[in-house]
Amino acid sequence: MTKKDSFEYRFRDSIDSDKLSPLVIMLHGYGSNEDDLFSFASDLPENYKIVSLRAPYSLPYGGFSWYDINLDSSSNFKINISQAKDSILKIKDFVENELKNKYSFDINNICLIGFSQGTILSY
């Protein structure tokens, strides 16, 4: 039995698949999934490998999040900082251990891009 990847994801190889290409990691926003930002893959340079990750926390109606967002009794947004930090560590581990073992890319040339929650984690 083979180990399942830590994340569901979409992948686009570079035209130089055997070279240590730059890697772009896409992180979607709250309530979306790995297909959302992957639609921009064709607009990025062909010599980049692209991975679009699905966030680990399921939401109703089929969406996903990198961390929970709730309202407190005063209607202020509260984020689950522990989940956000855990998502960052999971992404780091996924890149350094799982992706690195599957694909050749330049570990020193990684770009994170995101939307909404994905932007926050990218920062």
Image (cartoon, helix red, strand yellow):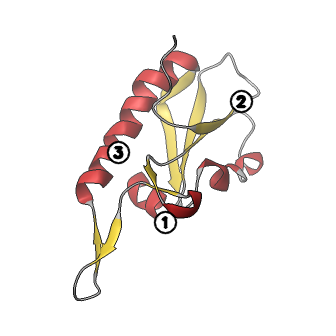
> Identity of the amino acid at label 2?
Ser
Q: Is residue 68 above or below residue 40?
A: below
Q: Position of residue 79 (x, y in %)?
A: 29, 67
**Is residue 50 visible from the viewing direction of this image?**
no
Which residue is pictured at 35% across the width and 62% down the height?
68
Q: Which circle marks residue 116 in the picture?
A: 1
Q: Position of residue 58 (x, y in %)?
A: 46, 53
Q: Position of residue 101 (x, y in %)?
A: 50, 16
**Is residue 115 visible from the viewing direction of this image?**
yes
Q: Earlier in the sequence, mark 2 or mark 3?
A: 2
Residue 6 or 73: which is nearer the viewer?
Answer: 73
Q: Are there few (<14), some (14-19), or many (20+) residues within 10 Å of tag 3? A: some
Q: Which circle marks residue 40 in the picture?
A: none
Q: Is residue 89 above or below residue 5?
A: below
Label 3 belongs to which residue?
88
Q: What is the tally of numbered marks visible in this picture?
A: 3
Q: Quadrant of the C terminus?
A: bottom left
In three-dimensional space, the C-alpha distance between marks 1 and 3, rounded to whole angstroms, equals 15 Å
Q: Earlier in the sequence, mark 1 or mark 2?
A: 2
Which residue is pictured at 60% across the width and 48% down the height?
34
Determine whether label 2 and label 3 are within 8 Å by CB.
no
> Identity of the amino acid at label 1?
Ser
> Identity of the amino acid at label 3?
Ile
Residue reaching furthest top? 1
Q: Which quadrant of the figure has residue 90?
A: top left
Q: Which circle marks residue 14 in the picture?
A: 2
Residue reaching furthest front? 60
Determine whether label 1 and label 3 are within 8 Å by CB.
no
Q: Is residue 46 above or below residue 36?
A: above
Q: In this rendering, which labeled residue sits more in front, label 2 or label 3?
A: 3
